[in-house]
Image (cartoon, rainbow, N blue to C red):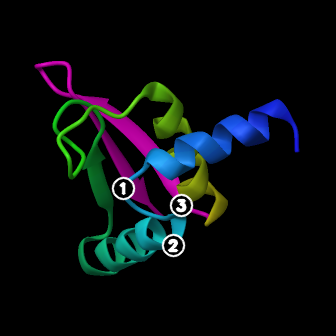
Amino acid sequence: MNTADLLRKEVTSKLPFTKQELINKVVECVRRDGYYAFYWGRHTSRDMHEFGSDSIHLVKDWIREEGFRIEKETSFYGVPTYYASL
């Protein structure tokens, strides 16, 4: 295991969900609404902590690995919103 793998494992352990839980939610929302949207920043986690930029890349990779597209939009207030779709 190299250093990047160790860091990835550390970042993954800090997320309040597993990859499978995330993918299940993405699939559920895409089936129902055609997309899955999520914010990344302050007040987006269960314990109200801000996720770092290292974890957003990991989550986007997980979603892309399952064949979904990711698009990013930024609100007027500078809050990034990510959309996963087919």
In the displayed structure, 5 sits above or below 41; it is below
Name the residue beneath numbered marker 2.
20
Question: How far is the residue under mark 3 from the one under mark 2?
Answer: 14 Å
Query: Where the N terminus falls, by quadrant?
Result: top right
Question: How far is the residue under mark 3 from the one under mark 1?
Answer: 21 Å
Label for residue 6? Answer: none
Q: Secondary structure at mark 3?
A: loop
Amino acid carrying label 3: it is Phe
Between residues 13 and 61, which one lies in front from this camera angle? Answer: 13
At label 2, counting other C-alpha atoms closer than 10 Å, the crowd grade (few under 14, some 14-19, many 20 or more) is few
Q: Residue 30, image x and y in percent?
A: 35, 72
Name the residue beneath numbered marker 1.
16
Q: Would residue 51 be found to the left or right of residue 61 on screen?
A: left
Q: Residue at x 43, y 72 (%)?
A: 21
Q: Which residues are magenta?
A: 67-86
Q: Residue 34, image x and y in percent?
A: 31, 69
Of badges 3 and 2, the one in the foreground is 2
